[in-house]
Amino acid sequence: MALSTRIRIAIVSFASLFYFKKRSKVIFYHDIHSDKKYTEMSTPIEVFKNHIQIILENGYEIVSEITKPIGQIEICFDDAFLGLFENIELIKKLKIPIQLFVISSYLNKKNHINKEQLIELNYNSLLIISSHTKSHKILNDISVDEIRAELKDSKSELEELLGCEVSAICFPEGKFNHRVVQIANSLDYKKQYSSLPGFYYNEVCPSVKRRSLVQFANKTEFESILKGGDHLLSFWYKYKHYKK
Ligand SMILES: [Zn+2]
């Protein structure tokens, strides 16, 4: 394990000692795999199952939408890689709601879920399909017109394909700025997900939610993140992700 990872786990574990309430939060992954892996960011299925077990053993409820400050967990997957589709029976068996953030122009791209598969997933009430922009451009590096196109086109393409409203977005690489938020609000994205870690009811700004990346977390790190130990790293992430 890399030294930086060890230091991070040590900080998160230490900080988690100061949180006693089970405050609600969003966790996210990129994919899951049993044998074939479609991205280096994929989580082995056994690790994912262990995470779910830890969540339930600690008395949290896994929900499609957090409505209470305490005791609820939302689970997201970014980028719509094929592993989630191939392992969907596990999700059904566990009965856990998942919010899937889809890059609309990546449907049919190698290693990604295609349009027919996304329609099939959308029939399953456990899955909520949301936007991850049209082409995964880093939103705080592009012009206002480009931001608008990335957000607007992905929303309309997904809504047309699925025949339902798409009202949430997550920012590619978690990066955003005040212009991105303004445009997302004007396009009626009611919820915008960042990658700034922390608690659900501690919004970065109105409509911008925090999420904790847990894809490679071992038991100790996962339990600490669940308790909110990564909230301490929020300042560092804000420095890296939020540009004025
Ligand atoms: Zn992404």
Image (cartoon, grey):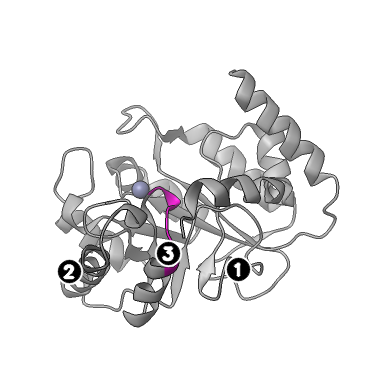
Can residue 45 be seen by looking at this rendering?
Answer: yes
Identify the mark nearer the N-term, 2 or 1.
2
Cα separation, mark 2 vs mark 1, equals 28 Å
**Labels 2, 3: front one:** 2
Identify which residue is drawn at 67% across, 63% down.
Answer: 24
Find out whether residue 150 is within the magenta segment: no
Percent from the top left, x then y, of residue 129?
A: 34, 65
Between 84 and 6, the residue placed more toward the observer is 6
Disc ID at residue 66: none
Percent from the top left, x then y, of residue 96?
A: 51, 58
**Labels 1, 3: front one:** 1
Cα separation, mark 1 vs mark 3, equals 25 Å
Q: Which residue is mark 2?
A: 157
Find out whether residue 176 is within the magenta segment: yes
Q: Is residue 209 above or below residue 111?
A: below
The residue stretch that appears in magenta: 173-178
Can residue 167 be seen by looking at this rendering?
Answer: no
Quadrant in which the N terminus appears? top right
Q: Which residue is mark 3?
A: 126
Identified by mark 1, the residue type is Glu
Q: Which residue is mark 1?
A: 203
Identify which residue is drawn at 30% across, 42% down.
Answer: 86
Q: Is residue 214 above or below residue 26?
A: above
Identify the mark nearer the N-term, 1 or 3.
3
Identify which residue is drawn at 17% across, 55% down.
Answer: 105
